Image (tube, helix red, strand yellow):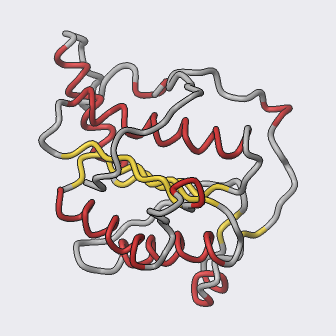
Amino acid sequence: VDDLGPVDVSTTFPIHRPAPAFTQLDTKLSIFETGIKVVDLLAPYRRGGKIGLFGGAGVGKTVLIMELINNIAKAHGGVSVFGGVGERTREGNDLYMEMKESKVINEQKISESKVALVYGQMNEPPGARMRVGLTALTMAEYFRDINKQDVLLFIDNIFRFVQAGSEVSALLGRMPSAVGYQPTLSTE
């Protein structure tokens, strides 16, 4: 997509790692200021918390995500990681072009970019789509733990992540739960 050649990697991390102990987690409450006044007033985001954006097609979820990525990069000096699970090629390309245009992705000096984009497209096998969410999470943990940066992690679409896991589980011959999800969902 970006025609920048292979990624120069000197350090790697496994995507399956133990979660940090509860004693290592920050317990103080603080609000993350998004820079979007209506969000900060009506539905403030907790730093270190989890947020779900739900809405039908065309209501502006992607616009909100792009604005949040832009704000964390320019106002807070943080970094964002976007994991597109089962994305359409057009959507992924549009987000990439928007990030280039807003200078959040710096093609001249890629190490100064403030966003990492990971995609597993709809036409990919379920194992590849499932690993996109885990890869994005591992990248976010790297920025948080090694680089000591504030990180905003987006997984779009969590339903497609669960669906890919269900497909992998079916291919492995595992019996689904009563509601149809894979038996390993709680550990994923």
Going 65% across and 68% down the picture, which residue do you hit? 45
- Name the spot of residue 5 as percent of width and height, x first: 33, 44
Q: Quadrant of the N terminus?
A: bottom left
Tell me the quarter of the picture where residue 100 sits: bottom left
Q: Residue furthest left?
A: 123
Residue 134 position in % (x across, y down): 45, 34
Q: Please name the residue shown 21% across and 46% down the image.
A: 121
| Residue 114 relative to residue 120: left or right | right
Above or below, 173 against 8 in this view is: above
Q: Quadrant of residue 22?
A: top right
Q: Quadrant of the C terminus?
A: top left
Residue 83 is left or right of residue 10, and the answer is left
Residue sitting farthest toward the front: 108
Q: Quick check: 164 above or below 153?
A: above
Q: Is residue 122 above or below residue 39?
A: above
In this view of the protein, which residue sits in the foreground, 22 or 20? 20
